[in-house]
Amino acid sequence: MCDADPPVPPAVARALEEYRELLREHGPTWGEPANGFVRQIETSAFLLDEADFWMAGLQRLLARYPDATAEEIDARVPELVAAEVVRDALAGRVLDNLAALRLTPDGASLESVPRTLPDGRDLRTTLLIDSSRTAPATVRVDGADHDIPPGGVRLVPITSESSVTADGTPIALDGLVRRVPTGRLRLRAGTPCRWTVVGADGQGWYPAGAPERIDAHRTPYFHGDDLVLDVPAEPLTVRVTRGMEHGTAEKALTPEAGAETLVEIAPERLYDAAARGWYGGDMHVHMNWTGDTVGTPAQAAAVQRGEDLHVLNLVAGNVAGERVYDREALEHWAGDDLPWSDATHLARLGVEYRNDLLGHLYAFGVDAPPGRYHTGFAGAPDWPPNGEGYRELRERGALMGYSHPFHLPADDGDPPAALLTAGRNCSAREIVADAALGLVDTLDVVNHSSIQATAVMYRRLLGAGNRLAATAGTDAMLSFQRRGNQSSPPGWGRVYARVDGPLTAASFADAVRCGRTFATTGPWLELEVDGHGPGDVLDLAPGDRVTATARTVGPEVATVQLRTADGVLAEGPPGEVTAELTVDRPTYLVAVATGPPHPRSMSRGGAFAHTSPVHLHVDGRPAAREDDLRWCLDYLDGLEDMIRRAARLDGPGQLAGHLDLLDRARAVYRTRLAGT
């Protein structure tokens, strides 16, 4: 791949500068209209876990509105004050980038995690002013007074050179910083990689100008090769990897003060997918989506190179209002490979089509920008239904699938209500209708929300006769440096597709549409059924026998399953699992690999991989399992109730349009049910 930074067209450069101005003026929300996402963004700079944020905010709202319904609580999330939620979620802890000034009836005291800094460098951080007093107080920071009500809290930016007084008494800030002599490292692997340089206290060190990113494990990282960075002249650990196809190499050292130390290490390759015709892609990555920095094409190129990510889909999308971030980049590059693409690495601009009640979709391979990017935001109606809204994207050549589909765990035997959680939380609620009508191609089984629940939905949809490929989209955001999984590197979850011929946007999309895929957080997962792989159809007669084999590569795998529409066929340890199946009715076979939390896996639930199915037809008939069909029909009834209750619609005509979509999907499932 080319090492030079990609050229930035004038319209894209202007948009990036506008984003920088929004960040300077408004902080990480970039001035977006307040809603639940925006409240979360306000706290994201402190690397609070999303679950911690939502639990703290939920408890605060329930205390204020004890009789409110789930929909009413969801509507009141914008009332939350970021500083109060941060304090509640931290529950007395302090973070490496957040000092706390505690105002108690006995006085004021500073709590902090000391940051190591080379001589001459200042620290920029945030002060949480936290009062447990029954009387108001005033804290003066850099000449400005901050009035703190009884029990109140404030978040105030400070530096290590700030002046802070409470009750008229200066607060010593010496504990914020630990000064050390400085050395220099030169890091070289021979190819772009992901690097981590940390001290004994876990603090990360970065090259000048590099985004100071932290992943879901709270591990600092940056990308590139032959990089130079200033570091403390004390014991450090250097780690290097290159995405999920590689292991991690590590070296401990103590740099010499005032000198440059060369570190040459490279990660070992675990498997080489492209050599076998398989290419891994992340279908849902944002260059910009508000945040604490501004993402650029150069950063996207560095990430894709450093992660050895074959396919990168950078999506343009809105947050809470009308503004569509990276729309200018899409308008310039739509239909073209991005400048740093090569024979084995492809980057494109795509779309995230968004409705918070019905679900969000990625679109890959669009040849022109759409006229509509979202519905239901800033008071706009939830109209048209998703299935109609993204018809235009399909006309523009898009491969489309539902992203971050479901957020709470669900088991195979759970009723539809388990996946129809209340509130406008961007769950993929319309997927059951759209899959029946052939309006979507894929489901992001690997995602940053609940992989478990999404896998349950995926297998229900397959059992009900739908053709969907298993894909992966991380929703990683280059404009966030500290946001858990969304500041993790793109490609921590990937869909691998077996491509016929050279890698192009069209060949990759065709492979995915054909179902020649598996989705993974890291493990390599193969499925073979009598010489056939995912996406293939075996037309069998009743009583025919097939042999299925699943194979895995990766240290994080603990269990491998072969599954049919009726459940687990065989299960075993990593490596290889084989089973025979006598086929008496239409079904499918998929392979699933799971494992506990592991450094290679950035998903919340641990390691995971899931193939698309090999379809086992009997007498020409595809899978149509009665239990799954009735489950889908019950789901559609629940979705109709939710739309009637919670959708924002302008008049009965819009409601009728939603109901028509659901009725057409019901007709498909009922026809299949009649044939079972």
Image (spheres, grey):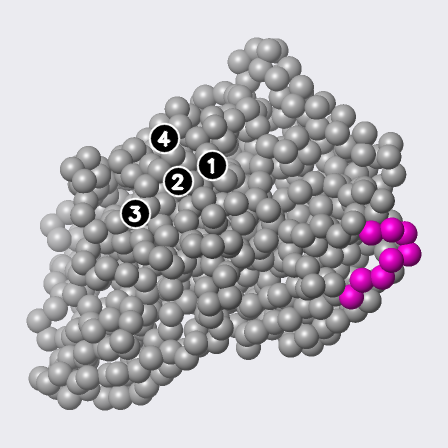
Sequence-wise, which precedes: disc 4 or disc 1? 4
Query: Is 450 above or below relative to 12?
Result: below
Amino acid type at circle 3 is Leu
Q: Amino acid at mark 2?
A: Gly
Q: Which residue is mark 4?
A: 369
Identify residue for label 3: 338
The local secondary structure at tag 1 comes to: loop
Tell me the CA gap for discs 2 and 3. Answer: 11 Å
Secondary structure at badge 4 equals loop
Image quarter of the C terminus: top right
Residue beneath disc 1:
398
Q: Which mark is residue 350?
A: 2
Any part of residue 212 in sight: yes
Residue 655 or 99: which is nearer the viewer?
A: 655
Upstream in sequence: badge 2 or badge 1 = 2
Residue density around tag 2, few if under 14, some if 14–19, many if 20 or more, within 10 Å: many
- Please tell me which residue is depicted at 80% across the width and 62% down the height of the picture: 546
* Vertical arrangement, residue 634 with respect to residue 131, above or below: above
Q: CA distance from mark 4 to mark 1?
A: 11 Å
